Amino acid sequence: MNAPHTPSAVTAATLTVKSAEDMRELGRRLATLLRPGDLVLLSGELGAGKTTLTRGLGEGLGVRGAVTSPTFVIARVHPPLSGGPALVHVDAYRLSGGLDEMEDLDLDVSLPESVIVVEWGDGKVEELSEDRLRVVIERAVGADAPAEGDDDADDVRSVTVSGVGARWAGVDLAPLG
């Protein structure tokens, strides 16, 4: 009996982000790599910067409306201001039913013409696409952590961006840093 094929990370980059503005800038740079049909999964603890990164993605994609956390509405659609893709911003934090519960949002219908960004999506939406970009945001530790007493200590993050599936094969993520 064959095990189901699970796509593996084909490209990755890890970088240090030192401020909220730098996180937004990372989102703007990341937006240049995205195209309609892309699924982006964001992971990180509360306050890690997932929504800040998505705000930068929205700016980079040129979408309408302020990108804010969709925690209570679950999903927000930001239409493009010009010819680019819409941004569908989902917060799966309060969802516990995995893909079944996510299907009620009709993300599979939006995916072909939109960029879908899902906060807290690990283990919930991977089945939407074999190709996805996974972004893990962690508070910096060790050598990357600022010295104790540094005023910017709470803003420093380690961000790992991993491309999964054929879509991301050969895509160089190093310029994000």
Image (spheres, rainbow, N blue to C red):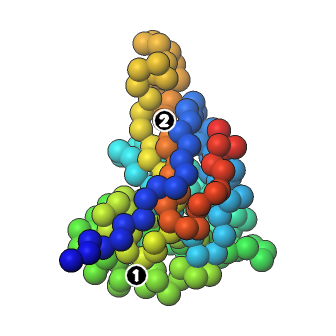
Residue 158 disc label: 2
Mark in the foreground, 1 or 2 = 2
Q: CA distance from mark 1 to mark 2?
A: 31 Å
> What residue is shown at x 26% (from left), y 71% (from top)?
3
The image shows residue 75 at horizontal and vertical percentages of 45, 72
Q: Amino acid at mark 1?
A: Leu
**Residue 89 appears in the rendering:** no
The image shows residue 18 at horizontal and vertical percentages of 57, 30
> What residue is shown at x 35% (from left), y 45% (from top)?
45
Question: Earlier along the polypeptide chain: callout 1 or callout 2?
Answer: 1
The image shows residue 168 at horizontal and vertical percentages of 58, 61
Q: Quadrant of the C terminus?
A: top right
Secondary-structure class at tag 1:
loop
Q: Which residue is mark 1?
A: 105
The image shows residue 30 at horizontal and vertical percentages of 64, 53
* Lateral position of residue 24 relative to residue 93, left or right: right
Front position in the image: 4 or 88: 4
Front position in the image: 59 or 11: 11
